[in-house]
Image (cartoon, rainbow, N blue to C red):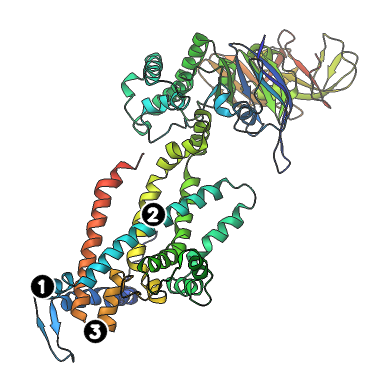
Amino acid sequence: MSYLELDNVTKIYPNGTKAVNETSLSISEGELMVFVGPSGCGKSTLLRMIAGLEDITGGEIKLDNRVINKVDPSERDVAMVFQNYALYPHMNVYKNLAYGLKNKGESKEEIEKKVNEVAELLEIKEFLLRKPGQLSGGQRQRVAMGRAIVRNPKAFLFDEPLSNLDAKLRGQVRIEIKKLQKQMGVTSVFVTHDQVEAMTLGDRLAVINEGVIEQVGSPIEVYEKPATYFVAEFIGTPQMNFINGKIHANKFISDEFECSINKDVKDQEVIFGIRPENLKVSANGSIKIKVDLIEKLGADSIIYGYDKSNNYLCYRENGNTKIKANEEISLEIEDENYHLFDQETKKRLN
Amino acid sequence: MKRVQFSSYFTQYFFIAPQLAIILIFLYLPIVQTFRDAFTIQDAFGFGRYFSGLDNFTFVLSDPNYITALKFTLIFIVVITFFSCSIGLLLAVQANNVIHGKSAYKTLLIWPYAIAPAVVGVTANYFFSERLGILYNFFNGLWGFDWYDNVYDAYIYVFIAASWKQISANFIFFLAGLQNIQKSIIEASIIDCKSSFRRFWTITFPLLMPTTFFLIIINITYSFFDTLGIIDTTTIGAPSGETKTLVYKAYIDGFKGLDLGSAGAQSIIMMLIVLVITVFQFRFIEGKIHYN
């Protein structure tokens, strides 16, 4: 059942920029939805419209069957965690957590009980009397989470909350957020430009580009069956390889190689996409590349090279590869794991 | 920055000589003279002077006119600081919320800052002149306003003249302070608190405290020292010396009354007052308002 629903939501700034274009999406109760996309794609604007920090130009946002377009941000029953924590620097941690409750007019005992519960849950009890300036990045992040949790909202809104943390801490906090969210079962929207965060956190992803949702689906769906060329390009590191060519009689033909197609696709110009891990070395492989660069990551090796028509292709192999730079290798496509996109509409064809 | 090595001492001193000369002539020399004047008494024709110990000080402090000026100065400082700060803050908050024509508002509100105190006084003179003054006639219609005779009316006159100019200075700094507050903190408070009035007093205002503290010092200094021109072009101390500030009185006694001993003593007393205020502010207030 849909709990948080966006219906044809549009945002046009006074200067005419269309940040979000007729976006519809429904998020079910307890689900963690990730908005992912490059910077400037409108994902934060969308989140801020849900929070009430941006006006909605058109469309409707519903939370738990209530239209919240015109509801004051403080009465929408949402809580937001900001990128730079946005803690109140002049208040100690206790007061930071209590501020929202106090303004709602809750009793002192009630506030104390709730704050202590949350402090216990997040293990920040010992910091309650400190000011945010005396805390480390990770601790501040917890306090910011606490400030959201203590309000007991119907939805959590996360605006890139991990991007200020260092790499190691980011991984830890990511896991913590996921656990907490599952434990509390609160519907959440998480905005990020980091696809690893998106893939690991989300129950579902909404991949956004230029104010439009390109695809909504579980992380694996989005990875395995990208709906558009943009999604294919954006999700996955190293990036998917793309080769331009055309379909003729259910066969993909490019300057480089040919490959028969398992599905009926009418004759047209297409982009053929294949992920680096879906290639394998084979003596009579049809794709031949001259190795340019090798990245050894320990668990994998990533091999980059040019094919005859100068496409820069990437191939991923497990472990420590024996391939050397400037070597010529032949690759073939594994298990028909390829993606076809219309060159015109950029939509998926297979 | 690159360090330049000079081969001879002469070149270095040559370059800093103009600055040194200015400091020596206009700062150090007057200070020395002030101390000399304060502790000596000069005969009326300037032919001789003799050491008088603290005589000048006891004379100044037992002079009822000096006590009047001291009282007026304290009231003046408090009123000017309070009104110019609060009106400056009010305007800054409003201008910060304006979406259309923001820079026009800003420019117009900053303008008076560029006006010299004496010019402010002359301008105020037009408003408060008995025959032409718009404000004179307006207040006169309300309660028989007459600053030539009534002490409190004279107060109102100089308070308005002196704070008007200073509002701009406060406006600039408060606006900068407001724009320095992290936007997301304000947004977090919008989600946490419905009433914008309450948000202002619980979040915005405390976060402006460093700016406010700075401005209080600036305003005290301004109303203490920089208003000489305004007093001299408006009431000239009228009625009967009730609107003389300490600085203005020292200036009149020293340069108009040619009583340099008294003026020197007054200057040193003023220096001590400012010293005490500043030490108090930094010791007791500043430590409480820096957050990070």
Residue A173 locus on image (x, y percent): 46, 19
Q: Position of residue B198 (x, y in %)?
A: 47, 36
In the structure shown, which secondary structural element does the residue marked by tag 2 occupy? Answer: helix
Q: Residue at x 53, y 76 (%)?
A: B132
Q: Are marks 2 and 3 in contact (CB under 8 Å)?
A: no
Residue underneath mark 2: B82
Does residue B231 appear left or right of residue A265 in this picture?
Answer: left
**Are marks 1 and 2 in one subunit?**
yes
Q: What's the chain of the residue with tag 1?
A: B
Q: Left or right of B47: which side holds B144?
A: right
Q: Give the position of the N terminus of chain A as an image quadrant.
A: top right
Q: Give the residue drawn at x 36%, y 54%.
A: B216
- The answer to whether residue A164 is above or below residue B16 is above
Number of other residues with Cα within 10 Å of mark 1, as a class: few under 14, some 14 to 19, many 20 or more: few
Q: Amino acid at mark 2?
A: Phe
Identify the chain of the residue marked 3, using the numbered disc in the image.
B
How many numbered marks appear?
3
In the rendered image, residues at marks 2 and 3 fall on the same chain: yes
Residue A279 numbered mark, or none: none
Give me the residue at 25% from left, 66% from top: B70
Residue indicated by mark 1: B54
Q: CA distance from mark 3 to mark 1?
A: 19 Å
Residue to which mark 3 is pinned = B258
Work out whether B243 lies above or below A16. below
Helix, strand or loop for disc 1:
loop
| Front one among A58 and A121 | A58
